[in-house]
Image (spheres, grey):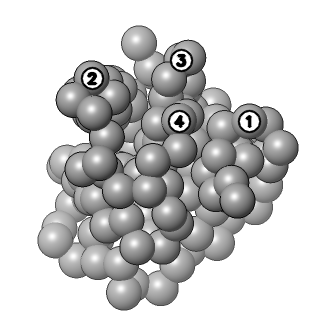
Amino acid sequence: MASIFSKIAAGEIPCYKIAEDKNYLAFLDVFPIKRGHTLVIPKKEVDYLFDMDDTGYSGLMNFSKRVALALKKSIDCNRISMHVVGLEVPHAHVHLIPINSMNDCNFSNEKLTFSKEEFEETAKLIAGNFK
C-alpha cells in the first residue's frame, strides 16, 4: 500500500509544494511546529532513510540543502534545523524547521494552525527563493 507521501508525490493528495524535480519533492508540513516547517521526500518510496542507495540518499540531502537555503531566505530565523525521525510515515523524509532556539525544534511542542491562504503564501514565498 502506498504511503501518504507517495500519494502526495503522485498528485493524488494535494500539498503546499515548495520545489520538486524528477526524484524529490519538498512541501509544507500541514502539522507544523514552526511556520515554514517543510518536508523533503524522495519520490521513490523507501521506508527507512538508511535503506536508500547512496545515489538516492546523496540526492535527497543535496535537494534538502537547496530547500533549506530557500527556507532561510524566506523565514526570519537563526538556523534551519534538519531532522530525520522516520516513525510517523513509512516513507523516508527530512524535516526542515526554521529555528531560533533548541526549543523551536521540539516535536512535543503544540502544532501550529494556519489558514489555507497562509500555507499558500508561505509556500509561494519559499518557492520563490528556491534555486
Q: Marks 2 and 1, Cα distance to the nearest angstrom?
A: 21 Å
Q: Which amino acid does label 2 sit on?
A: Thr
How crowded pointer 3 is (Cα within 10 Å; few <14, some 14-19, many 20+) is rated as: few
Mark 3 lies on residue:
21
Q: Which amino acid does label 4 sit on?
A: Lys
Q: Is residue 74 above or below residue 28?
A: above
| Label ID, residue 45 | none
Measured from the top left, where is residue 33 in percent x and y?
A: 44, 70
Measured from the top left, where is residue 16 in percent x and y?
A: 68, 43
Disc 4 to disc 2: CB gap under 8 Å: no
Q: Is mark 4 on a helix, strand or loop?
A: loop
| Label ID, residue 10 | 1
Q: Which residue is drawn at 45% across and 20% down?
A: 130
Q: Marks 4 and 2, Cα distance to the nearest angstrom?
A: 12 Å
Q: Which of 113 and 48 is in front in this view?
A: 48
Q: Nearer the viewer, mark 2 or mark 3?
A: 2
Q: Nearer the viewer, mark 1 or mark 3?
A: 1
Q: Is 49 situated left or right of 32 in this image?
A: left
Q: Which of marks 3 and 4 is nearer the N terminus?
A: 3
